[in-house]
Image (cartoon, rainbow, N blue to C red):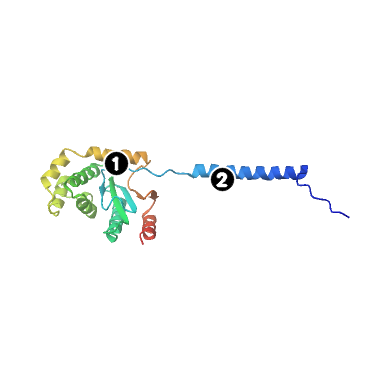
Amino acid sequence: MKKKKKNFFSLKNLIEGKVIFFVLLVLFGFVVIFAILSYRPPLSFEDDDDASMGPRNSLHTIRLFGDFTDQESKKYFDLFAKSYQDKKGSFDVNFILKSFPNEENKTSVDLANASECAQKQGFFWELAGLIYERQFLFSEYRLENQSNISILSSFTKEIKGMDNDKLNKCLNESAFQGSIDDDKKEAEKLNLKKSPVAFFDNQQLNSIEEAKKILEKKLK
């Protein structure tokens, strides 16, 4: 007895095929929607006027929106500065520091201005390092009636070649407030609320612990 040939174009098979196709189409649609919702365009940074510790064409770039009076900002600064120093002479990593002071804190704003004034003289990182290192002098260990300028003046004496009179004049005129405002606008575009906020390339770092892990992984 002859076997009956299977008819692939039977109504039953056609219906089953349509159902499978419909299911696959729905699944594909979910994948596309998920991909669209998950997509995050590359972050756009404006680094041209910011102090850069290393070559701008480095393989990786660390960015810190920091506040000189903030202790968490200091932790990030210390970590990133050390990471750069460990790789100094290579093109593995660059460190860019952006001013993101607390506008309600005069000392925070003054120190941001001081760093910009120091950059004009070519001593940004020297002064920034001293400010973070002796952050306590602007808070709990500040002498009575001691001004921010007088504390900064004691720092400039330790930086060979830095002109203290030019720094004071620049500070009194708030000559670089515009640069600080530009960093603030950049932070607002990135939807950043307050210091510190750090990035490794386009990845935002949510804690010091996460920053350490990323640096250990990427900068072996």
Regarding residue 217, the answer to whether it shows in the image is yes
- The amino acid beneath tag 2 is Val
**Residue 89 image-quadrant placement:** bottom left
The residue located at (78%, 47%) in the rendering is: 7
Which mark, residue 34? none
Query: Which mark sits nearer the N-terminus, 1 or 2?
Result: 2
Q: Tell me the SS state at disc 2.
A: helix
Measured as percent of width and height from the top left, residue 86 is found at: 29, 61
**Front position in the image: 24 or 50:** 24
Q: Is residue 34 left or right of residue 178?
A: right
Q: Is residue 210 left or right of residue 68?
A: right
Q: Are marks 1 and 2 in contact (CB under 8 Å)?
A: no
The residue located at (15%, 39%) in the rendering is: 172
Task: Specify the quadrant that holds the C terminus.
Answer: bottom left
**Front position in the image: 179 or 111:** 179
The residue located at (13%, 41%) in the rendering is: 169
For this orientation, the residue located farthest to the front is 2
Q: Is residue 20 left or right of residue 97?
A: right
Q: Tell me the SS state at disc 1.
A: helix
Q: Is residue 177 left or right of residue 156?
A: right
Task: Specify the quadrant that holds the N terminus.
Answer: bottom right
- The amino acid beneath tag 1 is Asp
Measured as percent of width and height from the top left, residue 135 is found at: 23, 52
Residue occupied by mark 1 = 183
Mark 2 crowdedness (10 Å alpha carbons): few <14, some 14-19, many ≥20: few
Residue occupied by mark 2 = 31
**Residue 45 image-quadrant placement:** top left
**Front position in the image: 155 or 69:** 155
- Position of residue 207 relative to residue 21, above or below, is below
